[in-house]
Structure formats: C-alpha cells, structure tokens
Image (cartoon, rainbow, N blue to C red):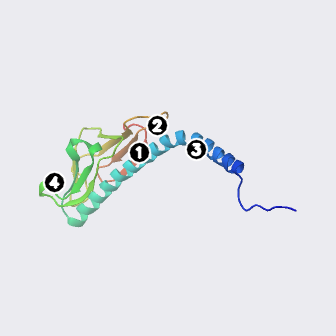
Amino acid sequence: MRHESNGFTLVELMVTISVLLVLAVLAVPQMAPFLQRQRLKNATMDLASSVVLARSEAIKRNGPVYVVANGSDWSKGWTVSSAATVSTASTIRAQSALDGLSISETGGNTSFNFGGDGRMSGTGLSFSVQPTVTSRGQQPLCVAVGATGRVQTTKGACS
C-alpha cells in the first residue's frame, strides 16, 4: 500500500530556503550600485523636467519664471516660481533635497530664469550631478541647459 503526501517534507523546505538564501547573498551586493545609478538618473530627470517646466511656464505667462536653488545649494533642492524671491512668488514646483547626491552648477550660479519669450536671461548652464559616495565605475552626469532652454544629459563630467 502506497501513502500519498500532500505537501513538502522538512528536508525539501530547508533545501529550498538554503538555495534562496544563497541567491539573496549573491544579489544584494549588486543592488547598491544599481540603486545609486537609478538615483542619479532620477535626479537628472528631475532637474531637466524643472527646466522644461520653467521655460514653458514663462512662455505661457509671457513673463519671467525663476529656478532658484534652496539655500544656495542645488543638492538641497530647488524651486520653480514666478519671482526671484520665494516669499513674493507663486511657487510652480518645489523639488526637495536629494539625499546621497551632489549637484553643482559649474559657474557657481544658484538661480536662473526664462523670459516670456522662452529664452534664458544669460548664457547656458551646466549642472554636474554625482553621488556623494562614488562606487567603482560610477560616472557623474552632466545636465547642460542651453540659452534657448534645450536640455541635454551626458555621461561624464561637464566640460
């Protein structure tokens, strides 16, 4: 007479758990650089989308729209608003601080604006976005903003 079982034995369960633990131990160290790259890409997309928003709002309002770093440091976030000083402005978008990243404008600018014609009031800007703790093979990203408002993201340091 044969006895059917309707489940797993304890040995089968322990072997399955052991295999899953080995795979997890191998995968976890590879996740940190991946997450750091994603955080870096997301920061550049946030910055680029804020520039595009500021330009389009300036055209829509037919007046200046400002992008201002929080506390004179782009890493602490920025604000897109209708005036140069946040206290007198209507805020269009506020970006909070980005942890683990360093964002700096190569010329040291802490603000810029677009006029009602959609052009930047000055020459273009370049932002260097890099992790505060660099892992092996991690390159900074450069977000270049032209005087016309065109945004381009490239790998490597800004030139």
Quarter of the image where the C terminus is located: top left
Residue at horizontal 40 percent and vertical 35 percent from the top: 133
Q: Are marks 4 and 3 in contact (CB under 8 Å)?
A: no
Picture layout, residue 35 above or below residue 149: above
> How far apart are labels 4 and 3 at the CA level?
47 Å
Amino acid type of the residue tagged 4 in the rendering: Val
Amino acid type of the residue tagged 1 in the rendering: Leu
Q: Do the residues labelled 2 and 1 touch (CB within 8 Å)?
A: yes
Amino acid type of the residue tagged 3 in the rendering: Ala
Q: Which mark is residue 86?
A: 4
Could you say whether the residue bearing mark 3 is in a helix, strand or loop?
A: helix
Q: Name the residue under label 1.
A: 40
Could you say whether the residue bearing mark 4 is in a helix, strand or loop?
A: helix
Q: How crowded is mark 1: few (under 14 residues within 10 Å), some or many (20 or more)?
A: many
Q: Are marks 1 and 4 in contact (CB under 8 Å)?
A: no
Q: Mark 2 points at which residue?
A: 138
Q: Mark 3 points at which residue?
A: 24
Image location of residue 8, percent across then percent down: 71, 56
Image location of residue 152, percent across then percent down: 39, 49
